[in-house]
Image (tube, rainbow, N blue to C red):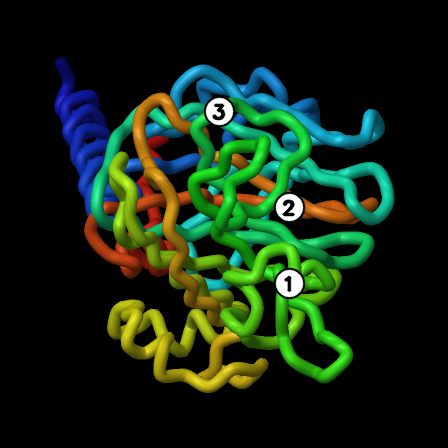
Amino acid sequence: MTVSQHRKITTTIASLTAVVLLFGVVDASAELIVYDGFNYGRSNSPMHGKSGGGEWGLTNSWIHSCSYAAGESTYMTNGLSFTNLLTSGGCAMLDVGGGRGGRIACGRQLAVTQTNTIWGSFVYSYANGSAAAGIVFSDIAPSVPVVPPNGSGSDYDLNLLVCVNIVGLGSTGDLRLDDEASDYPQWAGAVGGVWVGNDVTGLGLYKVEGLSTNAGTRTVTMWSLNAAQFSHFKPDGLTETELNAAALGFGDDQVLQRQVFSYSNSGAKFEDNDYLNLWGYVGPIERLYDEVRISNTSLDETVPLEPPAERAAVLIVR
């Protein structure tokens, strides 16, 4: 082996080591119990049947269901970007394909079990309008109708719902669950914030407490931030205390939406035979979802930052 070849091999090994160290530092997602960045190829195609994109904490493949035949769940190669948040790959787009009352879900079976508390995040955006969107955890595969949980249960057998834009301005100016607060009283007066409009990319955050197979009370706290707000709260670590103390609005030191509610049922589960469902209500509106992360440790762990440019540089040996 010549000196030149030896130097080239040594430099290559050093470069690969740097890459390994880089991803070891950067990829905070490795600590998560569930992650999907929607890396399912180089062409737009149906989400139904998708798997094998580097995700974890999920099993089998994505299942599409919609109450309108024209509804679609589509894998889009162009993913959502969100200032400073670590993102990759494409995203999922759900379109109800019909008018008011349409419901859509694209679900995937969980491969993990967690009791007590989980924290989660997801990036979302809208095209052609905006309406309710979010994540539903259920103990059956996606089917219709897809409805929010109510005190008496439903034919969708939901365990819990986390969401954004499930608020609408009522006739008195109060924020509530669209015009159906009377049907789901636990939401009335439990939500607050400003409406997230068309072509706005936001960050949905949530904490669920009281997860158990036994009867009891579950408490769900949800927040929604825009990019400037995330940049304001994240540098010293994203904390629930700061998000709960912030005013509601579009300001950099505010939060777009905050929702806290508790409800009782026979068992809100997060088990390896349950389903995580991307969810939407009312159409035709395109809802885009990306970077689904769930932690059993903290809210901050669900929002890893992208690496600084100087740390992302990789030496290429020619």
Q: Quadrant of residue 237?
A: bottom left
Ranked by sequence position, the earlier of labels 3 and 2 is 3
In the picture, the disc for residue 76 is: none
Quarter of the image that includes the C terminus = top left
| Residue picked out by circle 2 | 288
Mark 1 residue element? loop
Q: Is residue 68 left or right of residue 311?
A: right
Front one among 74 and 235 = 74
**Rendering coords of residue 127 (x, y %):** 76, 53
Front one among 80 and 298 = 298
Of labels 1 and 3, the one closer to you: 1
Ranked by sequence position, the earlier of labels 1 and 2 is 1
**Rendering coords of residue 76 (x, y %):** 66, 35
Quarter of the image that includes the N terminus = top left
Task: Tell me the kind of residue under disc 2.
Answer: Leu
| Residue picked out by circle 3 | 140
CB under 8 Å between discs 3 and 2: no
Dot 2 alpha-carbon crowd within 10 angstroms: few under 14, some 14 to 19, many 20 or more: many
Of labels 1 and 2, the one closer to you: 1
**Rendering coords of residue 70 (x, y %):** 84, 29
Ranked by sequence position, the earlier of labels 1 and 3 is 3
Residue 248 makes an appearance in the image = yes
Q: Residue at x 56, y 37 (%)?
A: 154
